Amino acid sequence: MGDSRDLRPATLASHLGRDPQRFLGAVNTPVFRASTILFPTVADLEQSARGEYEGLSYGLHGVPTVTDLQSAVATIEGAHAAFAVPSGLTATTLPLLALLKPGDHLLVTDSVYGPTRRFCDLHLARFGVEVTYYDPTVGAAIEREMRANTRVVFTESPGSLTFEVQDVPAIAEAAHRCGAWVVLDNSWATPFFFPSFARGVDVSVHAATKYIGGHSDVLLGLILTNAATTPAVHRLWTDLGVTASSDDCFLALRGLRTLPTRLARHQVSALKVAQWLAARPEVKEVIYPALPGARGHALWRRDFSGATGLFAVVLQPVAKERVDALLNGFRLFRMGWSWGGFESLAIPIWPEKVRTATRWDAGGPCLRLSIGLEDPDDLIADLAAGLARLAG
Ligand SMILES: *Cc1c(COP(=O)(O)O)cnc(C)c1O
């Protein structure tokens, strides 16, 4: 395909990360099952031991299905390199281990994905890293949270459960002035809707389990790095031995082919459902950055090129039994701890239970909706019946 800089997202998704001439003309890079790689001569093997061999050296260090996925997402998001790992959680935690050492200070957004928070509190703390949480809406005022030993600022935008859009460029500017790296959990926006590296991020991570996989049948993480952070992340990725499997990367590459097309539908449907919900008397607030008037909308418009289908809904105060009746009776929406698949999900959430730096009080029970690829009018009918159950 050659230089791809003039091509648009849907075209990139169709053409990056595959080279049929390498595989007997097959359109897709096949699943490549290999641990042992055989060398024709001692000289080749010795070259491989020195890390100077042109071909593959060992299955763990990347087979074509894995490296094709890595190079495709790196090109889409404008990264220097990408590393596939077995889960989104490995993707959020590995860069922190790679960039921090005992005595360093880490700043983490209070809206961070729960398991990332647990890793910081239990494990980074055990290794002598000081962890503090900050208000996700802090913006340039992050400067006041910086200490002499602050090495990393962890961001996630929009945040888990509460969807605060962070002023990532302002945070990056302040962090870099103080000599700290910026890591972003970019799972919500995918590599297509938030160009991390153009916004000042040093490491962008994805739960590819969500939209990139897109079919609720693969667990995978991606770590994208700029030139400065590539060596440390590459070193630890190699030394921990956490390459993703070829089968999972095959599924992620398959997901990538349709990602822009799916996202266009997720976005249109989510906006339609969000607008419908926002007009209902039972709903106090819809927290969806793409919704005009919603919190974070102005920053989202400034920095993102699109929205995906995951958002929160705050109901007017009502008894728990009524909310349970709403959730238990859905015909289409199902309950599960994930999102980004073709099927719609709805779960209750309790953001107030996990915060430490800020207080969360939305003034009513909260739900999180993942709007799938169903017809949005069928989803709205399901929600309308749910709101009737809410009333009792
Ligand atoms: C789900 C999720 C992860 C973790 O992904 P897994 O593949 O489930 O480990 C990381 N970050 C965010 C924001 C997520 O929603």
Image: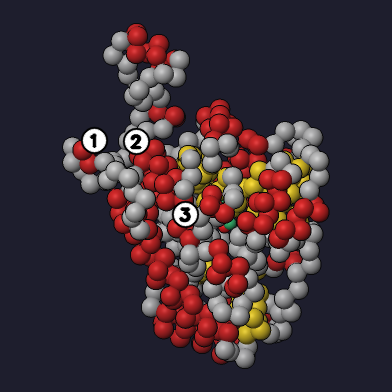
Say which amino acid is labelled 1: Arg
Confirm whether residue 370 shows in the render. Answer: yes
Q: Earlier in the sequence, mark 3 or mark 1?
A: 1
* Distance between the alpha carbons at the discs numbered 3 and 2: 21 Å
Q: Residue at x 77, y 53 (%)?
A: 143
Q: Which residue in the protein does label 1 denote? A: 22
Q: Which residue in the protein does label 3 denote? A: 191
Horizontal placement of 204 versus 5: left or right? right
Confirm whether residue 312 shows in the render. Answer: no
Q: Residue at x 40, y 24 (%)?
A: 58
In this view, 48 is above or below 138 = above
Q: Give percent across and percent down for residue 133.
A: 76, 54
Say which amino acid is labelled 3: Pro
Q: Which mark, residue 64?
A: 2
Horizontal placement of 194 versus 295: left or right? left
Say which amino acid is labelled 2: Pro
What residue occupies the far left of the structure in this picture?
24
Horizontal placement of 143 versus 55: left or right? right
Q: Residue at x 39, y 14 (%)?
A: 47
The response on whether ligand 1 sits within 8 Å of label 3 is no
Quadrant location, the N terminus: top left
The response on whether ligand 1 sits within 8 Å of label 1 is no
* Distance between the alpha carbons at the discs numbered 2 and 1: 10 Å
Q: Are marks 3 and 1 in contact (CB under 8 Å)?
A: no
Which element is circle 1 on?
helix
Q: Earlier in the sequence, mark 3 or mark 2?
A: 2
